[in-house]
Image (spheres, rainbow, N blue to C red):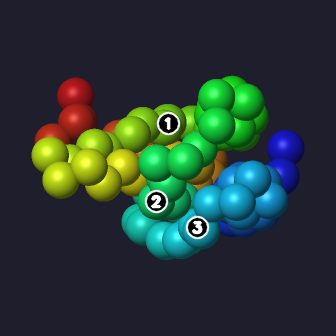
């Protein structure tokens, strides 16, 4: 399986190839990809976009009352193999 950063960049590249302008953002536990969705996106392109997004760990669509739509996808970063990976507040 490719490293999370490679997976995120690959998703961004595939979305860009479909005509979307993407942003890749690094977070502590995941890498996110965001893209504004033009109103002129065809049904076929939507299907292709959803196929790309299905490769992410999570994805969604933010829609505003002003008509703006932003796709987002998140690729989780690797979890450390040792130590307490549950984080604070999740201890037994």
Residue in the image at 26% along x and 49% along y = 67
Residue located 64% across and 37% down the image: 42
* Contact check, label 2 and label 1, Cβ < 8 Å: no
Mark 3 crowd level (few <14, some 14–19, many ≥20, 10 Å Cα): many
Answer with mark 2 or mark 1, whichever residue precedes in sequence: 2
Q: Nearer the viewer, mark 2 or mark 1?
A: 2
Image point (22%, 36%), residue name: 90
Q: Position of residue 71 (x, y in %)?
A: 46, 48
Q: Which residue is mark 2?
A: 36
Q: Which residue is mark 3?
A: 22
Asked if the residue at tag 3 contacts the one at tag 2, i.e. Cβ–Cβ closer than 8 Å, the answer is no
Q: Which residue is mark 1?
A: 58
User: Which quadrant does the N terminus fall into?
Assistant: top right
Looking at the rendered image, the quarter that the C terminus falls into is top left
Which is nearer the eye, 48 or 52? Answer: 48
Distance in Å between CA atoms under marks 3 and 1? 16 Å
Which of the two discs, 3 and 1, labels the residue nearer the N terminus?
A: 3
How far apart are labels 2 and 1 at the CA level? 17 Å
Residue 10 occupies which quadrant of the picture? bottom right
Per the image, label 3 sits on a secondary structure element best described as strand
Residue 14: x %, y % from top left: 78, 54
| Disc number placed over residue 38 in the picture, else none | none
Expressed as whole percent of the image width and height from the top left, the position of residue 64 reads: 20, 48
């Amino acid at each position: 399986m490719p490293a999370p950063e490679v997976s995120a960049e690959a998703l961004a590249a595939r979305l860009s190839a479909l005509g979307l302008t993407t942003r890749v953002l690094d977070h502590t536990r995941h890498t996110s990809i965001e893209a504004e969705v033009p109103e002129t996106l065809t049904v076929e392109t939507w299907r292709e976009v959803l196929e790309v997004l299905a490769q992410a760990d999570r994805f969604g669509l933010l829609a505003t009352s002003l008509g703006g739509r932003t796709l987002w996808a998140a690729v989780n970063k690797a979890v450390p193999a040792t130590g307490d990976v549950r984080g604070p507040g999740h201890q037994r």
